Image (spheres, helix red, strand yellow):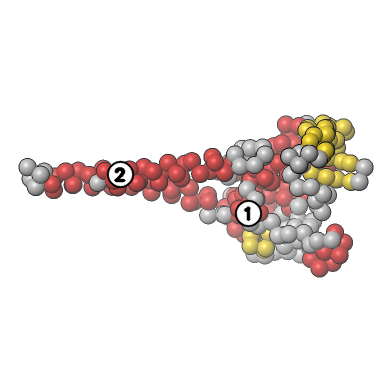
Amino acid sequence: MSTMIRSLAGAVLLLIAVPGLAAKAGNLDSAGTNVFDRASLQRGAALFVNYCMGCHSMQYQRYQRVADDLGLSEELVEQTLLLGDQEISDYMMSSMPYEESADWFGKGPPDLTLTARSRGPDWIYTFLRGYYLTDNGWNNTVLENPAMPHVLWDLQGIQRALTETVTDDEGNSVTVVTALELDSAGRLSTEEYDRVVRDITAFMEYAAEPAILVRQRIGVWVLLFLAVFTFVAYLLYVDYWKDVKK
């Protein structure tokens, strides 16, 4: 019985610890998203449609599911999220033709439905805050020479990179970005832009696993049930073996 209790405790601690370990992986900023913040998800949905869906799709997400999960009326979705002749029952598909866009950009814009699962919210958050302008165009501290331009530059402004030359392990001199500084202000302050990026990231995190809104709430009750069941099982164990161990 004690072995079972230790195993259960270990499993619970592992479930708690894994997200924290994942968040610290790599040189990324913490997104600080909250998928249970419905207002943040609603803002993120509107921002995603207006700034991301010009190129990117969410081919596994329907507008109707978004409306139901985020508490949006069908009328509001039709007014603020639907593009062109789309209907609320449609998937969230970009109007940009994929094959032609591959010729225009050198690579077709990827579908973003599962990006928060594959990359993680911290990666998305840091990526959207990590653009800086060079003489050759936009670059990014997370993904070098991205095919995607900085579509949020009018909100954030234009950043420039502060660099320094260092020597790598093989003795070669390389230039690295040490920091970013705002060269030209955008329409939002730094704090406001960070909130915009956090909202977009939160919506993408939700879209990658819509069931998370229910799964995590159910998970708390499951753990409570297991704790109560373990206690009852232990009492049964003590009562069953008390005469045997005499």
Q: Looking at numbered disc 2 in the image, what kind of residue is underneath it?
A: Ile
Residue drawn at 56 percent across, 54 percent down: 210
Residue drawn at 30 percent across, 44 percent down: 5
Whichever of labels 2 and 1 marks the residue nearer the N terminus, that label is 2
Q: Which mark is residue 244?
A: none
Residue drawn at 57 percent across, 54 percent down: 209
The location of residue 246, given as percent across then percent down, is: 7, 42
The location of residue 154, given as percent across then percent down, is: 84, 41
The location of residue 42, given as percent across then percent down, is: 65, 46
Callout 2 environment at 10 Å: few (<14), some (14 to 19), or many (20+)?
Answer: some
Q: Looking at numbered disc 1 in the image, what kind of residue is underneath it?
A: Ser
Quadrant assignment, res 82: bottom right
Q: Is residue 235 left or right of residue 92?
A: left
Residue drawn at 76 percent across, 64 percent down: 85
Of all residues shown, which one is farthest toward the right?
Answer: 135
Of all residues shown, which one is farthest toward the front?
Answer: 171
The location of residue 198, given as percent across then percent down, is: 67, 40
**Mark 1: secondary structure:** helix
Callout 1 environment at 10 Å: few (<14), some (14 to 19), or many (20+)?
Answer: few
Q: Is residue 47 left or right of residue 234?
A: right
Q: Nearer the viewer, residue 127 or 232?
A: 127
Q: Is residue 37 left or right of residue 229?
A: right
Q: Which mark is residue 118?
A: 1
Mark 2 lies on residue: 5
**Vertical order, 124 against 97 (above or below):** above
Is residue 22 among what the camera can see? yes
